[in-house]
Image (tube, grey):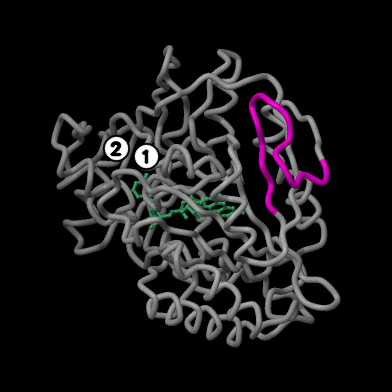
Amino acid sequence: MRDFGGIVERSPVRVVRPRSPGEVAAAVHEAASQGLAAVPRGLGHSTYGQSLTSGVCLDMRGLAGVHEVGAGHAVAGAGTTWREVLDATLPHGLAPPVLTDFLDVTVGGTISAAGVGGSSHLHGTQAANVLALDVVVDGEPVTCSPGIRPELFDAVRAGLGGHGVITGATLRLVPVPDRVLCCTIPCRDAADLLRVQREVRADDLSGQVKPAEDGWVFEAKATLHSGGPPPGTAETEELSFLEFADRLRPDVEELVALGEWARPHPWGMVFLPASRAADVIGSTLASMTATDLGLSGVILVKALRVGHVPMLAAPADPVLFSVLRTASPDSAPLGTMLAANRALLTRAETVGGTRYAVDSVPR
Ligand SMILES: Cc1cc2nc3c(=O)[nH]c(=O)nc-3n(C[C@H](O)[C@H](O)[C@H](O)COP(=O)(O)OP(=O)(O)OC[C@H]3O[C@@H](n4cnc5c(N)ncnc54)[C@H](O)[C@@H]3O)c2cc1C
């Protein structure tokens, strides 16, 4: 079995698809009685074997579904995708405050990672926007929240499944508009991109670095729920909220058709302290070319707040720098890309940075 990274392979003794917290507990008990690990898997979109095991694979898609949508909350199974959450909440004019850029990952998987989105500069991570969790811990189904077993609530969010299996989540919801305005702001360099992310007021803010003939081009995307384009805007586009939330779908379809989606994805992702981020991003880009990124690779820069998520090791005032490489046929070899991720992490750690644990760094 592989994950989206396509680098690590593991053969589980068995794959179990539990359909209730009780079935999760039974599967965990049975695995433990055989001396096997039971590892939850959402949709396996982490990139270096985080969801893989030689023991028992718990396929959490058996626990998909939105069970309740209230005025400010939704209750969903851990295997529900964020697309399925939106399908249930948008008819009520509501959505989770933070969505991942790609909607086909699971609620349990991203809460276990942290879940960074374009609105994380306002709302923190997805893990910080959970009201309560249903968890199987020590083989027993329990509920936890900031007021009930807070130590467990803090251990499972961004815990990568190591402190319990999340079976369901009560998610915070906020009102969203029917339509949004997406603005593209060209930037000079990494420092300028970070300045825009600090200064521009937008509901969703992200930064991208793209290869160009003579180096790299930098652009910020600011998406507004109301009001006009911010200073520096070069292009605007009006989209429905769903079109915006699902904006990666056409690209993903193209990458699937090209075969790029199935290639190895050695992703380097580090949290940098904002004060040192431009230096690290600049020196990383100076030492790489488009070949080191791969045909469909993407570089993202996102200044964010984490919120109260004790398990997420990140500097204060973090910037997530993501070098999302694809080992395409004419790109640098996979081993070179993995070594570059290791070098990036070392560079990050030297200035007080940390890794985002769904990355691909050989350990
Ligand atoms: C195209 C793409 C776009 C992405 N965009 C973003 C983004 O915008 N923001 C972001 O933060 N991340 C993003 N990611 C990374 C993604 O958040 C992680 O891969 C995350 O792990 C969710 O994927 P998943 O649901 O497939 O979980 P998996 O990869 O299956 O699991 C991730 C980890 O969580 C554990 N886990 C899974 N389910 C549970 C559960 N129910 N209980 C306890 N532990 C569990 C697993 O054991 C594993 O350690 C993206 C990934 C891809 C491939």
Near mark 1 (Cα within 10 A), the count class, few <14, some 14-19 or many ≥20, is some
The answer to whether 138 appears left or right of 293 in the picture is left
Residue 132: percent from the left, percent from the top? 28, 30
Q: What element carries label 1?
A: loop
Q: What element carries label 2?
A: helix
Reading the image, the residue beneath label 1 is 18
Mark 2–mark 1 Cα distance, whole angstroms, equals 5 Å
Quarter holding the C terminus is: bottom left
Between residue 181 and residue 250, name the one nearer to us: 181
Residue at figure coordinates x 55%, y 55% from the top left: 302
Is the C-beta of the residue carrying label 2 under 8 Å from the nearest atom of ligand 1? no
Near mark 2 (Cα within 10 A), the count class, few <14, some 14-19 or many ≥20, is some
Whether residue 344 is situated above or below residue 80 in the rendered picture? below
Q: Give the range drawn in magenta.
A: 220-235
Main secondary structure type of the part rendered in magenta: loop
Q: Do the residues labelled 2 and 1 touch (CB within 8 Å)?
A: yes
Residue at figure coordinates x 20%, y 61% from the top left: 34
Residue at figure coordinates x 71%, y 46% from the top left: 248
Q: Which amino acid does label 2 sit on?
A: Glu
Whether residue 157 is situated above or below residue 241 in the rendered picture? below
Tell me which corner region of the image, top left, top right, bottom left or bottom right, holds residue 17: top left
Between residue 79 and residue 280, name the one nearer to us: 280
Residue 323: percent from the left, percent from the top? 59, 68
Q: Which amino acid does label 1 sit on?
A: Pro
Q: Is residue 173 in the magenta section?
A: no
Residue 36: percent from the left, percent from the top? 25, 63
Residue 74: percent from the left, percent from the top? 42, 22
Reading the image, the residue beneath label 2 is 23
Whether residue 162 is situated above or below residue 229 in the rendered picture? below
Whether residue 182 is situated above or below residue 154 in the rendered picture? above
